[in-house]
Amino acid sequence: MSTSVVTVGAGMFADAVAGQAVDVERVDWRPPMPGTQDDLAAVATDRRRPEANRRAVEAMLGVTAHLVDVAPASEVLGLEKGQFLHAGPPIEWERTSGPLRGALMGGAALEGLVEDPEDAVALFESGSSVSLEPCHHRSAVGPMAGVVTPSMWMWVLEDRATGKRTYCSLNEGLGKVLRYGAYGPDVLTRLRWMGDVLGPLLQAAVRGTEEATDVTGILTQMLQMGDEAHNRNRAGTLMLLRDLSPAMVGSIEGGGFASKDVADVLRFVGGNDHFFLNLAMPACKLALDAGRDVPGSTMVVAMARNGTDFGIQVSGTGDQWFTGPAQVAEGLFLGDYGPDDANPDIGDSAITETAGIGGFAMATAPAIVRLVGGSVPDALATTRRMHEITLAENPRWSVPVLEFQGTPTGIDVSKVCRTGILPQINTGMAGAVAGVGQVGAGLVTPPAEIFPQALAALAQAVPGRSL
């Protein structure tokens, strides 16, 4: 008579039994997050949930993002002097992290509110003539500190089917840049060049291109070319350059731009492998915004960090933020920097993971481990693991090495609470002190407690639930 054993939990026990020539069936089961049992039961019995999640996912997957314009934030977002956008959930100056403070200080100098960025500290402490607001509250996203000021030029993406739009600033490159909290003279000089030359030339190129660039389509291609669209955007940047460069060159005669300016822009974009990130992010936000505000849906529609707090928003709970302390990433550091130099996680760029790429699609870009740490098997395992906490697969965005399986898409709050598996994010690391800039890159997860918070709010909204 043959014997078989079903094991749950620790692998050591299963290995020991298997070593005795016994058939072992391993069940990958984890207890739910502590204190979530009642809320999980309430949400599981919500009759709206299956249809609500189907609608949210279908709406998200139905969006195609097209690049339709480039324009100053004052025009497309209505920002006025003294108004600043930032990454992550809402925050006051007193609680801002070093890199966010540095970016706000540099932004104030860029706008002429102060001559010396250091003088901006008193300006923000007084709060009398300045205001802070999350990028997400204006249909925008910003990488790292995510600071947007009125004079900064923005990408404008549109879903042609609905006319809805999202926005993102232009990418400065790596190292000592504003989004990492640096604000020295070289940072401000580059930003002014971006406002005077890069933005206007990109606007002329986008408006002069006969067919609007299909950003969603580029994402589809780049995922099969070794990018994951968060920390690796090399193929995406080159495809964007392919689409826009003819109109840029044509603007020398037709648009009055100097040939040197065109050459400088082509050189800048071609030498900045992260340039496409600032298009991938608003494309993901455009898709996720389509899945918002579906009563009963447990799908996460935003993950964002301001360097102090990590926040999520969920389709079924509207604009409410669920927040906890941002974590410090684990990874690789530049030069002599180490963990003590790094600020906790920051930026709206986790919108890529929320949509099913970035850290969720690391299997498409195994080379990413050379930037953020880990191994190629780790990258493959991460993508497989994310399927356990998502509602669907994205048929547009497939993973060649996994037999073209769609990327895991639609983070489900209830699945995160039931399994204890947290979303995986790959990210850059900013220095903890304002002005330092980038210190490394690595892997990070949200604080676990924000998902039970969201689950509790979803449970309270179940019709007929007795409290």
Image (cartoon, rainbow, N blue to C red):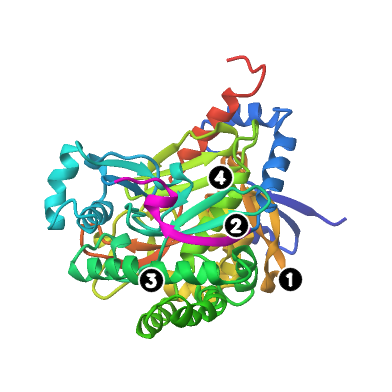
Label 3 or label 4, whichever lies nearer to me, is 3
Q: Position of residue 41 (x, y in %)?
A: 65, 28
Q: Position of residue 106 (x, y in %)?
A: 22, 58
Q: Secondary structure beneath disc 1? A: loop
Which of marks 4 and 3 precedes in the sequence? Answer: 3
Q: Are marks 3 and 4 in contact (CB under 8 Å)?
A: no
Kind of residue sitting beneath label 2: Gly
Kind of residue sitting beneath label 3: Leu
Label 4 or label 1, whichever lies nearer to me, is 4
- Disc 2 to disc 4, C-alpha distance: 11 Å
Disc 1 designates what residue?
Answer: 403
* Residue span colored magenta: 65-80
Q: Secondary structure beneath disc 2? A: loop
Q: Are marks 4 and 1 in contact (CB under 8 Å)?
A: no
Q: Is residue 140 above or below residue 280?
A: above
Q: Viewed as shown, does residue 453 lie left or right of 158?
A: left
Q: Are marks 2 and 4 in contact (CB under 8 Å)?
A: no
Label annotation for residue 198: 3
